[in-house]
Image (tube, rainbow, N blue to C red):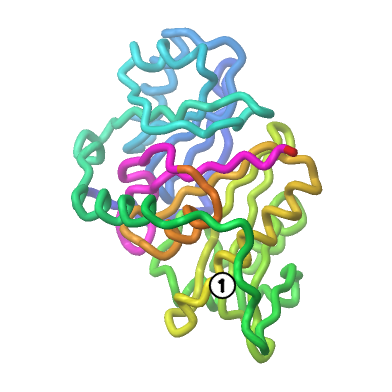
């Protein structure tokens, strides 16, 4: 399977008729961000546009009433994000231009990890952090440490988290980063990418140094992010977690997230396209 060279600087939004698209060269995919009136002609034109850009996958989070139109055009439903649109569900639809990319590898292993996660009991509140650990909201002064942990944990990543300017921009615009410190050093981190229009947020950028894993650090970070987002009036939290990574899937399951599907070969992470499990939690009071 061809893995396109990471070129974050080429990623950009484009308008096509009455739709807004995101050209995601780093992950060889096109995201349909918005559209006004969906039609067969519009979908066909979007697919042709993606082929012309040599992108391997087209994805969209669409409303229930538009699913049939996408299916007729060859899209498949890979999952659901409950409450994505201010309480209304989104269907996660995908079209595989690169047919090899539709093939899920190591499916039995990933299903086994998922089963193990689903067997875990859910918890209402995580255990307190150990003495000497501190949970913080990240600010610009933590950015050098943030890039360091991301570079250590991820060989490649779907977004440019190694870039200090990118992190600074995202902090100001829409992403809340939290971290656990030990001796003033970041040892674990997670974030919430906030969609203020639709009142959903993606829990993402979860990373822990190997020597500190298994201590419930991500569970504490996710719990803290959730409380902040509840106060802001958000409806839904969701997370796309690597299907081969038991740790983050277990953390999400234990914290009350529900498994809602799997996005096959969805993004370029750790030097290859990986399947991402969809986990969703409603937090509307």
Main SS of the magenta part reads: strand
Q: Is residue 267 left or right of residue 192?
A: left
Mark 1 Cα shell of 10 Å, populated few (<14), some (14-19), many (≥20): many
Quadrant location of the C terminus?
top right
Whether residue 274 is visible here, answered yes or no, is: no
Q: Which residue is mark 1?
A: 217
- Above or below residue 249? Residue 179 is below
* Residue 279 is a magenta residue: yes
41 and 173: which one is in front? 173
Name the residue: 29% across, 31% down.
97
Name the residue: 51% across, 69% down.
207
* Residue 207 is a magenta residue: no
Q: Which residues are magenta?
A: 259-284
253 and 222: which one is in front? 253
* Residue 251 in picture, x, y percent from top left: 49, 60
Which quadrant would residue 131 be assigned to in this image? Answer: bottom right
Name the residue: 59% across, 47% down.
202
* Residue 107 in picture, x, y percent from top left: 21, 48
Whether residue 260 is visible here, answered yes or no, is: yes
* Residue 185 in picture, x, y percent from top left: 63, 85
Q: Is residue 132 left or right of residue 239?
A: right
């Amino acid at each position: 399977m061809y893995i396109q060279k990471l070129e974050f600087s080429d990623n950009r939004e484009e308008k096509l008729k009455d739709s807004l698209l995101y050209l995601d060269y780093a992950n060889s995919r096109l995201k349909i961000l918005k559209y006004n009136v969906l039609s067969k002609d519009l979908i066909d034109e979007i697919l042709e546009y993606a082929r012309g850009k040599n992108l391997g996958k087209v994805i969209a989070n669409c409303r229930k009433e538009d699913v049939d139109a996408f299916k007729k055009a060859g899209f498949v439903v890979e999952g659901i994000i409950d409450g994505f649109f201010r309480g209304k569900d989104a269907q996660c639809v995908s079209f595989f231009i690169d047919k090899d990319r539709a093939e899920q590898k190591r499916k039995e292993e990933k299903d086994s990890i998922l089963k193990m996660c689903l067997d875990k009991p859910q918890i209402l509140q995580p255990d307190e952090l150990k003495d000497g650990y501190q949970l913080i909201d990240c600010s610009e002064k933590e950015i050098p440490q943030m890039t360091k942990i991301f570079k250590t944990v991820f060989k490649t990543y779907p977004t440019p988290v190694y870039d200090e300017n990118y992190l600074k921009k995202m902090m100001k615009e829409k992403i809340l980063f939290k971290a656990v410190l030990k001796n003033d050093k970041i040892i674990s981190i997670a974030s919430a990418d906030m969609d203020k229009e639709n009142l959903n947020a993606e829990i993402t950028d979860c990373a822990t140094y190997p020597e500190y894993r298994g201590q419930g650090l991500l569970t504490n970070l996710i719990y803290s992010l959730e409380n902040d987002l509840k106060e802001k009036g958000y409806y839904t939290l969701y997370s796309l977690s690597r299907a081969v990574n038991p740790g983050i899937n277990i953390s999400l399951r234990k914290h009350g997230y529900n498994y809602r599907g799997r996005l096959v070969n969805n993004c370029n992470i750790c030097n290859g396209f990986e399947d991402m499990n969809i986990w969703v939690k409603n937090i509307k009071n």
